[in-house]
Image (cartoon, rainbow, N blue to C red):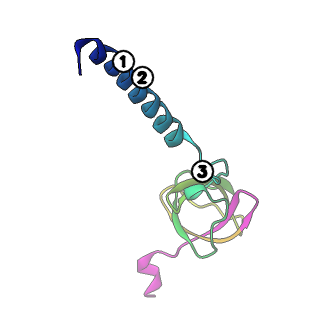
Amino acid sequence: MTTDQVLPAAAIAVVLILVIVGVVRIVRRRRGANEDTFGAGGTNIVPPGSRGIAKTDLAPSGVVLVVGEQWTARSGSGAEIASGQRVRVVAQDGLTLIVEAEPDAARAGE
């Protein structure tokens, strides 16, 4: 390869590399089919029986952390559930979880 051929070859290689990098970035940014849905891992359904913790007081509504995501929730019985209390999902109304307080470990033995 002569000096006259090296410069155009290098320019073509740089352009090719830039095109490949651009295509890779576009492919990586492409959103998954379920990324627009709300909830844990891209799902909007939480199975009954899932356990979590109250992040705010539920009196009767508030926020809980269940399956790694924060959800709006309300107490199924209408009773107040204190922040930090463990909860269990009993049902779901749209994107609102219906939860009940988990009994304390000390009370479970009584």
- Which amino acid does the dot numbered 3 rest on? Gly
Q: Which residue is mark 2?
A: 15
Residue 52 placement (x, y as % from top left): 51, 65
Nearest to N terminus: mark 2 or mark 3: 2
Magenta stretch bounds: 92-110
Height in image: 78 above or below 70? below
Query: Dot 2, crowdedness within 10 Å: few (<14), some or many (≥20)?
Result: few
- Which amino acid does the dot numbered 2 rest on? Val
Q: Residue at x 63, y 56 (%)?
A: 58
Is residue 94 magenta-colored?
A: yes
Q: Residue furthest right?
A: 93
Q: Secondary structure at mark 3?
A: loop
CA gap, disc 1 and disc 3: 35 Å
- Which amino acid does the dot numbered 1 rest on? Ala
Query: Dot 1, crowdedness within 10 Å: few (<14), some or many (≥20)?
Result: few
Q: Residue at x 57, y 57 (%)?
A: 40
Nearest to N terminus: mark 1 or mark 3: 1
Q: Is residue 54 left or right of residue 91?
A: left
Residue 70 placement (x, y as % from top left): 56, 52
Q: Specify whether residue 97 is in view.
A: yes
Residue depth check, mark 2 versus mark 3: number of the one nearer the observer = 2
Residue depth check, mark 1 versus mark 3: number of the one nearer the observer = 1
Q: Which residue is mark 3?
A: 32
CA gap, disc 2 and disc 3: 29 Å
Residue 39 placement (x, y as % from top left): 61, 55
Q: Quadrant of the N terminus?
A: top left
Q: Which residue is mark 1?
A: 11
Q: Are marks 1 and 2 in contact (CB under 8 Å)?
A: yes
